Every structure is written in C-alpha cells, then in structure tokens.
Amino acid sequence: MPEVSRLVRTPVFASLYASVAFAACGAYAMQQSDPPEPPRTLPAVKLPLRPGAGIDRRAVDEDGMRALIESLVRCGTRLTLSSWDDPARGVGCGRDRIVERLKAISAATGGKLEVVVDRFDATSARTDGKPAHLENVYAILHGQDPQLAKTVYIVSGHFDSRPSDVMDPAADAPGADDDASGVAVSVESARLLARAASATGGQRATLLFAAVSGEEQGLLGSTHLVEWVREQGYRVGGMLDDDIVGSDPAPGAPHRVRLFSGNGEIDDADSSSRELARLIEEIDGRDAVRLVFRLDRFGRGGDHYPFWKAGLPAVRFTEPLEIYDHQHQTPRVEHGVEYGDYLKFLDYRFMGNVARDNAEALRQLALAPAPPEDAVLTGAVTPDAKIAWQAAADPERAGFEILWRETTEPRWQVLTTVGEPGQVVLTGVSTDNHFFAVRAVGRNGARSIAVPAVAERRPIPGSTSK
C-alpha cells in the first residue's frame, strides 16, 4: 500500500497516527482495568451442544427452486387484482403452481404436509377501498410433542407480483425476485424439513410454510395470516419472512443475506423479534447472516410487519444489495436501461444458501423447549444482580442459560447455567453495566429464543407519577 506508506512518513500524519494509537491503547488499558464481573467463576451446569444432523447445503434442490420460479413467471402477472380463475395467466395461476409443488412434496414424503388454500376478502387503498378476493397457500408440518404442537414457526414468501402501476392487472409483472424467490425458499424449506421429519420422526413444534397474496396491495395476506393462526389455536413462536432473496450481483458473491429485526418499546429490553434474529445468526453463523437492527429497509415494509406489530417474533430476510430497476417495474427498455424483474437476474446459488439457512433455523427452533416466561431483573442499589423467571415443566428440557452482554454490545454471551426455573443471584455482578436474558435448552441441544430480564420499574426521584 504505497500511498499509506508515503503518508506515514509525513510529520503531521505520523503525529496524528501516534495520537490515535495512544488513544486506542489507552482505551484498551482502561477496559482491562475495569473490575471483573463476577469476581469469581460462577458454577455452571453442563448443557448439551447444539443439535447435530443439520440440513446439508448439498441437499438443497436448486433445480426444483428454479422450476417453481419459472412456472410462476410464466403466469405473466400475479397481481392480486388479476384473475383467480384463469389457469394460464394471473394470480390464480401462481396459486395453482404452488399447490401442485407442495402436494408433490407431501406425496414424496408419505403425506407429511397438510396443504391448505385459505380464501378470504380484504380491503385497502390498493383495492380501491372495496373488498377484494385473496387466497393464501399453507403447507403444515405438524409437531409431534403434545406440549408444543400448538406452537407454530412460520416461513413465508408472497406470490403476488406487481408492475409499475400497482393497480394495473393487465400489465406483465414477472416477479422473479419479488417475490417468487421468497416463495421458492419457503417451499424448499418445506421439502427439506418434510424429508427430515420422515427420517427422524418429526419435530416438537409445528412448522407452517406459507405463500401469501396481497403483499403489494398492503400486506393483506400476512395480516390475515396473523388472525388465521390464532383462530386455529396456535401460538406463534417465530415468523421468517423471505422477500427479495434471489439476487446477489455484486462482485465477490455470494455475500451474506441481510436479516432485519425491529426493536421493542420498553427501555433496556429487546423485542422478541430481535431475539429471534440473534438466535438465527447463532444457528446459521455470522458468515451467512448479516444482522440489521431495524424493522425493515428504510421507508419500506414486508410481511413480517403485521406479526411484529402484534408483538410476535418476526424477521425479514433480504438479499445483500437490491437493484431497484428490477423491482416494481413494468418490463421495458428506456434510454438503454432494462427494467423488469426477470429470471435472468437471479442467482440460484445464493438463493439455495438462503433456503438452507431458513430450513436449519426452523429445524432447531421447532426442536427447542418453550422460552422462559416473566423474566425479571432486580437488585438495584445492591452488589448483586438477581434474575427470576418461570417455565412450565418439560421432561425434554436440560436447563437454562443465563445470558449477558455489555449495554453497547449486539450479541449475548453465556454467563452461567442453571438446571431449574426460579431465581439466580449473580454475586458481584452489577445491574448497571449489562443487560441480561434467559433461554431454555433442550436435552437435544436446541435453544429457545432468549427472553430479556426486564428491570423493575422505579419512580424517578421527585416524581409523583406511578
């Protein structure tokens, strides 16, 4: 690096470099001089490693994903306002292709999947304020543990597409990336996990693989899905939205998929969505997932939003660098620029990575115990942090991990482990310097989503508010 070498020789830069180096060393020294917390090693229960026999990347069927996307693109448009009855063109054509693929997967795995077409009406500004017919497609892989079978983990892509004018049902809208790619990831996850269930006997919780409509008309399909799962008596353990996950054109690909998660509204406590994102990164690895700590791309939204708004754990997967000429565009060429969401812009190697990462995260989530409940942090104005939580009895649970992190750090670390719910006293650990959380660990090694220990609320000195 000759330019840097020349700069280092200049007196001004050398002096500045020395100052920066000194400051960095000083900061490091100050960090090292902080008192240790805790002052001595805490006792720990030995908990199992994460579940083995994970989803092998080589098992991903990229050809099957390609075939599904090509069949969706051949429908010409899949705008929600287009025809639901024409077998060759329109949104109903897209629905039929997805149902066919899911039924074929179910047949190949001994009927493991229950395929459901959910029909309903919805209204928004993008339906001209009138009720519009919509349909979602679900494939359900039922949980085998009576205690957790009514907990559902969802992966979804939206099968509707749009041209430049979101109200034009006649214009072509191939929608290869937005969002046939996300549908392909959801359907491939169904194939991978139905096969795994056939080999192992199944998972504890239920998995739901969704392809929803109405996203481009105002998140109508996913908003309805929130209510549908409640009507079926399910508790949502987590929702993974895959939207625009099919392209990775920047040099040096494949890059990491972005994973967006919204925060909570309580001071000093993360949302369940943020905890879901952290756990997915732990499962799939930092080299596969790029955490983005915001609800969605700036000024935009996706099908995870209705779940997040309802207080449910929900995240969004999106490709590393979006190309806006290929989103929400009627196919055309203007001034030498090609617009349109075409098949030729897709990267199936990258998309296959995303499918594997979704499937493995879902596999481990569905094997895990239920998260703890009512985690509370106390111990203010004392030398010890105290964390209490509750959890229903579970013979498949090995224990709990107490997590902590500096308030400026994005990721948890394991501080100690305990065998049973109740209260743990962290002797010599300040309540001021760290955030804390608890998560359950199964005998199979699967970890639940972490539950932040919410600090007790104390009135502001001199305040009369409660």
Image: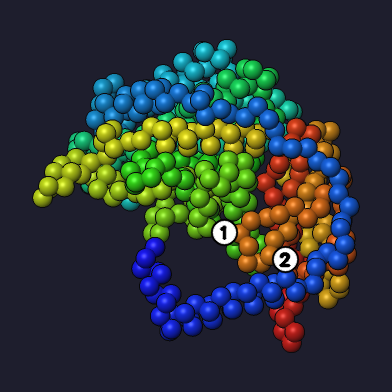
Q: Earlier in the sequence, mark 1 or mark 2?
A: 1
Q: Residues within 10 Å of mark 2 (few under 14, many from 20)?
A: some
Toward which corner of the image does residue 38 lie, by quadrant? bottom right
Depth check, mark 1 against mark 2: the one in front is 2
Residue at image mark 1: 263
Up-down relation of residue 463 to residue 403 (above or below)? below
Q: Is residue 454 left or right of residue 260?
A: right
SS state under label 2: strand
Query: Residue 104: where, in percent of width, then height?
Result: 46, 15
Residue under the point 24% across and 30% down: 76
Q: Which residue is drawn at 56% across and 15% down?
A: 109
Point out which mark residue 419 bears.
none
State the quadrant of the N terminus. Answer: bottom left
Q: Do tag 1 and tag 2 residues touch (Cβ < 8 Å)?
A: no
Image coords of residue 164 (percent x, y): 23, 46
**Residue type of the residue flagged with mark 1:** Asn
Q: Mark 2 points at which residue?
A: 434
